[in-house]
Image (spheres, grey):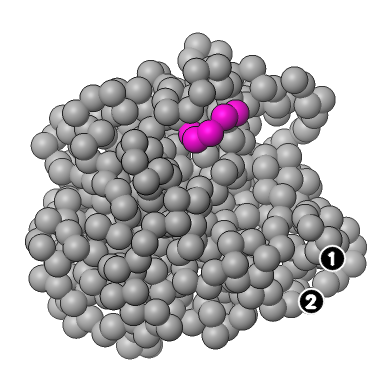
Amino acid sequence: MLLALCLAWSAGCGPAVTPAPAPQMSSTAHRYIKHIVIVIQENRSFDDLFSGYPGADAPSYGYAGTKRIPLRPVALENRGDIRNNWLDAIHGWNHGKMNGFYGEHFYGAPRDFAYAYVPRDESAPYWSMAGEYVLADQMFPTEFGPSFTAHLSLIAGNTTLDPEPIAEVDQPGGYPWGCDGPPGARSHTIDMRRIERFDGPRPCFQNFRTMADTLDAAGVSWKYYASPLRRIGGMVWSEFDSIYSVRYGPDWAKVISPQTRVLSDVEKGALADVSWVTPDWQDSDHTGSGYNRGPSWVASIVNAIGESPYWRSTAIFVLWDDWGGWYDDAPPPQLDYRGLGIRVPCLMISPYARIATGAKTGYVSHTQYEFGSILKFVEEVFALPPLGSTSQGFTDTRATSMLDTFDFTLPPRAFTPIAAPYSKDAFSNERPSYILPDSD
């Protein structure tokens, strides 16, 4: 199947961003940071979650063509849905005009459904984290499109397939993702002309070097917390399911299910050096779920770590895997034919979080980051080599590290619990939904 789409793109259509300060030596970071936790939420743009946030690029209105549209509140538990595939992202981006989100809706929702923000009473835990720690307002996914390639970027820093200059895009065919999917499943690809085809390989990849390779080689422990998709049989929602060497090797034991075990691992003193945490459907911020538990789920992880001995040695990154179809005003810089994709929120939570000048807490970073920025920080802290070169499609080499969101010259701050509607116990005792948090 060929989607006859060939779009011009330019590296010069990104927003003005603040150059990153000179990074501190990684040896400095490693003296303070021993644990990194990457919490991945679902499908929200920056403007959708943080519209109106002081000091951030977060307007309260958007544009559909030339028409200015005020953003209106749409609850997390709203049953409506939005299209958010690669082509939808390209339309929303509209060559950097950021005015093509009109009509991205399902199930009878209004045509301007994407022009919205999450009500403040529901996003309050995220705003509290931002007000106390660091909010990055220039975080961009590696490429346009939805969750599958976003999660791949967060473990591999790459979506490029060998031997041709093509990349994975959109969701693969079949259920679920990866090696546990149907034997005949194929994947979508785009080429350097941004033409999309459904002719890619089975998503059980043997060509992706991932963080599992470099972490294992250095003896750095890791875990990937994933929601279960079956009551029996061990099927889980994890991007590592698409990595052949992990799925069929000893590292598969490091994919932990259910994802709520991260809470008990913190309590038992069993937190790995590096952790990825993904949500259950009922704790996801994905639109159409009918739930509003996502902010409390993230707060439960932050509070568990903050109230444990791990607090003084941990950095927590919270980010959303893709924009979910929601409006955003920031044109993503186009670094290659894959993207960067539409902006998402990113929080950095640590006792060493940078503090705004003249303020006691809270800092808004305007530095341009991409998903490879988090992987680069992991590499700096644990003295790991890069996954590969930029010419091979790896993004950790080119990305700006998030090291500049820390300040190790100040004493570590004490932790203040994040208030949330649902307590940590609500998640510790939660029964899995066995529903895909995101099918794309």
Q: Earlier in the sequence, mark 2 or mark 1?
A: 2
Residue at left offset 56%, top offset 22%: 185
Q: CA distance from mark 2 to mark 1?
A: 14 Å
Between circles 2 and 1, the one closer to the viewer is 1
Q: In the image, is residue 348 part of the stretch drawn in magenta?
A: no
Question: To which residue does mark 2 refer?
Answer: 70
The residue at the point 50 percent across, 51 percent down is 435
83 relative to 240 in the view: left or right: right
Identify the residue position indicated by label 1 in the image. 110
Principal SS element in the magenta part? loop
Residue 130 appears in which quarter of the rendering? bottom left
- Which stretch did the figure color magenta? 173-177
Q: Position of residue 424 (x, y in %)?
A: 30, 75
Tag on residue 157?
A: none
Position of 233 with respect to 53 (left or right) is left
Residue 285, percent from left and from top: 53, 63
Vertical placement of 34 versus 2: above or below? below
x and y percentages locating residue 211 in the rendered image: 29, 36
Q: In the rendered view of the protein, which quadrant contains the C terminus?
A: top right
How packed mark 1 is, by other alpha carbons closer than 10 Å (few <14, some 14-19, many 20 or more), is: few
Residue 98: name its quadrant. bottom right
Which amino acid type corresponds to the residue marked 2 in the rendered image?
A: Pro
How far from the left and from the top, in percent, is residue 203? 49, 25
At x 26% / y 46%, what residue is drawn? 256
Question: 234 or 279: which is nearer to us?
Answer: 234
Residue at 43%, 79% in the rendered image: 125
The quadrant in which the N terminus is found is top right
SS class, disc 1: loop
Horizontal placement of 77 versus 310: left or right? right
Q: Residues within 10 Å of mark 2 (few under 14, many from 20)?
A: some
Q: Secondary structure at mark 2?
A: strand
Q: Look at the image and tell me whether residue 155 can be seen.
A: no
